[in-house]
Amino acid sequence: MKNSINSSLLFKKSIFGILIFASILLYSINLYSASTENTTSLEGRENCVSCGQCVDKAPNSFELDEIDGKVNIKIVHPDSHEVFHVREAKKACPLQIISTNF
């Protein structure tokens, strides 16, 4: 009887440990995928000269604001196809205000 209680307790502790491990693993995977996602941002938007080069190169990702004429980001996390266009827009920007992690 005592052995079955100890076995049952050991089994419950093992299952609990496995669940904790799985939770930590899934959390780590989510952190990794979030950190490797393609991201576009603007550094110094106020310095934008409204030349439109970014919109010409990547119209799905950038637009010029109707009020102040400065660039806005339409897609913060571009997919693999749009990444090419965002890179071209980044190269074309005369003030280099487009920032990416790819």
Image (tube, helix red, strand yellow):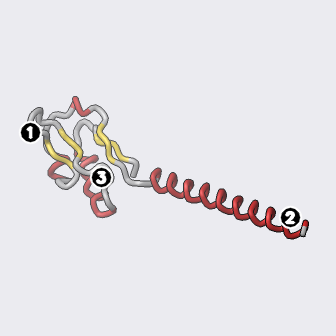
Q: Nearer the viewer, mark 3 or mark 2?
A: 2
Drawn side of residue 19 relative to residue 69, left or right: right
Left-right relation of 16 to 77:
right
Reading the image, the residue beneath label 1 is 66
- Closest to the observer, 66 or 27: 27
- The tag earlier along the polypeptide, 3 or 2, is 2
Q: Position of residue 73 (x, y in %)?
A: 23, 45
Nearest to the observer: residue 100 or residue 11: 11
Give neighbour class at mark 1: few <14, some 14-19, many 20+ (Cα, 10 Å). Answer: few
Q: Where is 6 relative to 32, above or below?
A: below
Residue at 19%, 53% (x, y): give it. 57
Image point (55%, 54%), residue name: 27
Q: Which three-letter amino acid code belongs to the residue tagged 1?
A: Glu
Look at mark 3 in the image and give the residue it sits on: 87
**Label for residue 6?**
2
The amino acid on which the numbered mark 2 sits, given as a three-letter code, is Asn
Picture disc at residue 12 = none
> Tag 2, which secondary structure?
helix
